[in-house]
Amino acid sequence: MFEKQLRSLKRRYHLLRPLKHARRDGIEYQLDCRQLIDYNIYLGFWEKDTHDFIENYIGDGFVTVEVGANIGAHTLLIAKKSGNQGLVHAIEPTEFARSKLLKNASLNPDLEKRVKVHNFLISDSIEENPRRDIRSSWPAKASMAWQPEEHVSSPVSTIDRLLDDWGLTRLDLLKIDIDGYDYRALLGARGAIEKFRPLIYVELSENAQQVNGYSITDIVDLLTSKGYRGYDANEMYELSSENVLARLGHKDSINGVFFPEEKARQ
């Protein structure tokens, strides 16, 4: 009981004095504890399964494309784990999150050199704009006022087109978290997936996919057809189109990590 009360008091204090400068995993952040992602970084990290995946699977010299980088909660850790020869192409179309990502990167000059921040909407078609109103801000407490969705006018591209434009000769990790447009992003990355065979880390949210007429089973089926095996990132339980919906349980989403069959999971 006392520990619960202590946690409640700490939470209230952080919300009363929300602006923080914190160092986590050797990385400097400027945080606003009224924001859910910021608050979790302040407590330690955002998304334990993603944090553990980065710690365990990102290697020296990795080239990463991160679609939906938000404020850099994972971007900077990936850059750190990738070493001096690593590179992260961080794609974030919202001004709110992108400005915070750039600020956090600037606090870490050695990592900033390894991070390239891009303003694009990612889809499976260059001509079609998949969405203009995007949320990149969530309150730390449900009772707090929500920031409105941001009206975005970023150019639209596919991952395949961007990799060609950037002249990338390798891709080790493709990470996607774009609230229901993940499947369409993967459709627009089929060339890169076949050519580079990267690890793929993607959010699996059935509700978000259904808004766009798809299912997370489509994601699993697509990547399976490309010679990948998928796992629930939290427990590394193998996923299939038959069991992935059951793995969600009461959760809104889980993270899936997909390994090309020729690269055995460690």
Image (cartoon, helix red, strand yellow):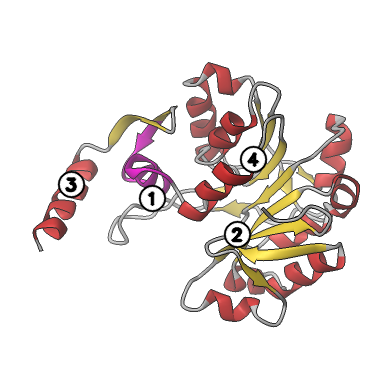
Q: Tell me which numbered mark, 2 or 3, is placed earlier along the sequence.
A: 3
| Residue identified by numbered label 2 | 179
Q: Which of the numbered marks, if any, corresponds to residue 58?
A: 4
Q: Is residue 79 left or right of residue 264?
A: left
The answer to whether residue 172 is above or below residue 190 is above
Classify 10 Å Cα crowding around label 2: few (below 14), some (14-19), many (20 and above). many
Residue 139: x and y in percent read 36, 52
Residue bounds of the magenta highlight: 30-45
Mark 4 or 2, closer to the camera: 4
Q: Are marks 3 and 4 in contact (CB under 8 Å)?
A: no
Query: Gap in Å between the C-alphas at discs 4 and 2?
Result: 24 Å
Task: Tell me if residue 261 can be seen.
Answer: yes
Q: Which residue is mark 1?
A: 36
- 3D distance between C-alphas at marks 2 and 1: 16 Å
* Dot 1: element: helix
Kindly identify the amino acid type of the residue bearing the numbered disc 4.
Answer: Ile
Lower sequence index among marks 2 and 1: 1
| Disc nearer the start of the sequence (3/1) | 3
- Residue at (33, 52) in percent of width and height: 140
* Dot 4 or dot 1, earlier in sequence: 1
Q: Which dot, 4 or 1, sits closer to the camera?
A: 4
Dot in front, 2 or 3: 3
Q: Which residue is mark 3?
A: 10
Q: Say what amino acid the circle numbered 2 marks.
A: Asp
Q: Is residue 114 left or right of residue 135?
A: right
**How far apart are the two marked residues, 4 and 1, measured between alpha carbons?**
25 Å
Q: The disc labelled 3 sits on which kind of residue? A: Lys
Mark 4 / mark 2, whichever is N-terminal: 4
The reply, left or right, for residue 206 in relation to residue 169 is left
